[in-house]
Amino acid sequence: MNAEVKTELAVLLRQGVVWRGSSAGRASAAVITSGFPSLDEQTGGGWPGGALSEIFSPQGLGFSLLLPLLAELSRQQQWLTWVNPPHVPYAPALEARQVNIARVLLVKVRDTEQSLWAAEQALRSGNCSLVLLWVERVSAARIRRLQLAAEESNCMGILFRPLQQRQQASMAALRLQVTPAGDGLQVQVLKRRAGWGGKPLHLSCSG
Amino acid sequence: MLWLGFYFPQLPLSIFAGEQTVPLAVTRREKGRDLIDRCNELARAQGIHAGMPLNTALSLLSSLQVRERDRAREQQQLEALAGWAWQYSSRISFDPLLMLLEVGASLKLFGGFSSLLERMQQEQPAAADLQHWALAPSPSAAALLARYRPKARITDPGQLPGQLADIPLQRLTRRRQVLELMQGIGLSSIGDCLRLPRPELARRVEPEFVLLLDRLLGRVPDPRPLWQPPEIFEQRLLLLHEIGQASALLFPARRLVESLCGFLRGRDGAAQRLQWQFLHRDAPPTPLAQGMLAPGREVEYMLEIFRQSLERLSLPEAVVEMVLRVDDWQAFQEQAGDLFDSGAGAQDNSFLERLRARMGSEAVQGIQVHPDHRPEHAWRYCEPLEKAGDRCAVSVSHGHQPIWLLPKPQSLLVRRGRPCYRGELRLQVFSQRIESGWWDDADVARDYYRASNSSGQQLWIYRDRRSGRWFLQGFFD
């Protein structure tokens, strides 16, 4: 390898565009534990902060994966903004799982365009620790915008998308496929930063 | 007593909102003719001046915008200003184009006259120009000096005659009888009158004039009607040009919002709900309710929310006049730390306002727990910053409860004795029995189960024990 290539590679490495397999698995500072040790292991420490994650699942499944995260983040003085959740979150059940619902902000809008706008506003506001968005159809370009918004304001964003769309390329830092398995969930890491996921995980989330 | 007078020479022009980027003049009628009463700088640059007949002015400058002088509106504007000034003095009176504040009692509070004036000039609403002021021991002297000797500062009544001496008599009174008489005996200024022995003067002129002089010099009390602040805020603004585009309403709105915030400051209040009305030539007025998360009185903040609200405003016609009304203002409280329990640092919730302004306030909500055993009554939507009320001691068991709730239980089909939802359901765990609500008309007797269907969905269903029917009420994931 000549010197020129080496420096170019160094630049790319610094930008995080490429990574070395040897450094995989090292938890970066900006992750928040998911509360599930086996999932943390496969994702490099948990949910990536200041970035977008995607959960692909049938019928919007997989929300219970977030409960430990919600409980943790709701102790901060920032909003947990939920854009277009599929149903009404059941307040007593959330409280029973140590989620401080006073931090929960529900945004109900008519169309996809508005929900994307609202999610981006929330991500950029600097007032939210987490932005959740349920969306049926979204272009790779819009996901890129959301990812940039999350990076710029160091806010965590998580998208819930239909299972069928998992083939679509995206800039999200973490992509999970979630399917039901018995009374728990099967989680497959489709994409993560600086590494690969492993075998599908079986997590029993007391939903 | 010490009176601080402010004179607003531009008021007849400035009540007409809109850009002062066109030559503008107001007229008055005198002896059956329309005369230019005042004009702005742009008109003056084209040779228009006060006292010029309107016809002459228009022949000089055909693009001159002309309005008739509107004294009622000028007075309204003064009163709006008084709403702001109320924080400095509770004794406020008016003369045409003049606002008079008794500040003797407030000087100590504000640390002397200089710092009071400085503070007022720093905080003045943009619509007001506090350049022309005067301080004097009597209200009429303060009024006269503010007009003709601005920045005069007299605290000792003994200095008054000297300061007023060379002001011509016709500035003090317009009564022709008095003026002609005075001219007849060679008196032309206030000083000339004051040099005359008082009994001499009293013999020659009507007693009203003597009283006027006595009040001017503070020798006798000058009882004036004092302004009473209104309970509600309502102000109208005539637009110089009709506005057809909603977004263009932002500019004139600033004037009204500044005035409102002045009113609120003056009364140590804050507003949460602003009611706008946009008046058209023919169509009925368009209302716009501007709600905010918390009561406030910051001009820029309110304007930003107003700007956002405009995005969902559609105008049937151009706007000719706008009205801002607030009738439920409340006592101002420092917000910092109040929004969240622990009070560590004030939250900036402007993004919340932005969302609500753009999508309507019902689109953005919080949730609360409500003590009730029936799941559909065990929660409610709330304002995002609303604190949960005191929890009742009703301990509600929430074992095995789902994260998602259907707003209304959904009746399930039963096939071969089994409830179905996207396939037959398998009951997994008995969750709980709920019997409650006998006190209102929605009493329930239900057995709840956790169930799953073939695709692995975990559902929360119940059997109504009276009817035997099955219902879906939530999802576990």
Image (spheres, coloured by chain):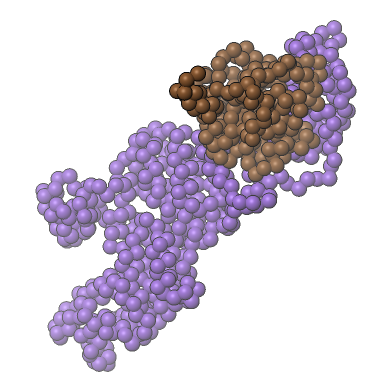
Q: Residue at x 78, y 25 (%)?
A: A205
Left or right, residue B51 beside residue A66: left
**Residue B190 picture location, percent across and down:** 23, 81
Determine if residue A68 is in view.
yes
Left or right, residue B431 beside residue B311: right
Q: What is the letter of the brown chain?
A: A
Outermost residue, top side? B416
**Residue B105 picture location, percent across and down:** 48, 76
**Residue A34 picture location, percent across and down:** 72, 30
A46, B110: nearer the viewer: A46
| Residue A201 figure quarter | top right
A62, B431: nearer the viewer: A62
| The hue in which chain B appears in the rendered picture of the protein | purple
B411, B359: nearer the viewer: B359
Left or right, residue B161 beside residue B117: left
Q: Quadrant of the N terminus of chain B?
A: bottom left
| Residue A188 figure quarter | top right
Outermost residue, front side? A2
Q: Is residue B103 above or below residue B438?
A: below
**Residue A194 picture location, percent across and down:** 62, 24
Q: Is residue B208 above or below residue B247?
A: below
Q: Quadrant of the C terminus of chain B?
A: top right
The mark total stands at: 0
Q: Residue at x 47, y 72 (%)?
A: B110
Q: Residue at x 56, y 14 (%)?
A: A168
| Residue B414 figure quarter | top right
Q: Residue at x 33, y 73 (%)?
A: B134
Left or right, residue A47 beside residue B249: right
Q: Is residue B17 above or below residue A8?
A: below
Determine if residue B210 is in view.
no
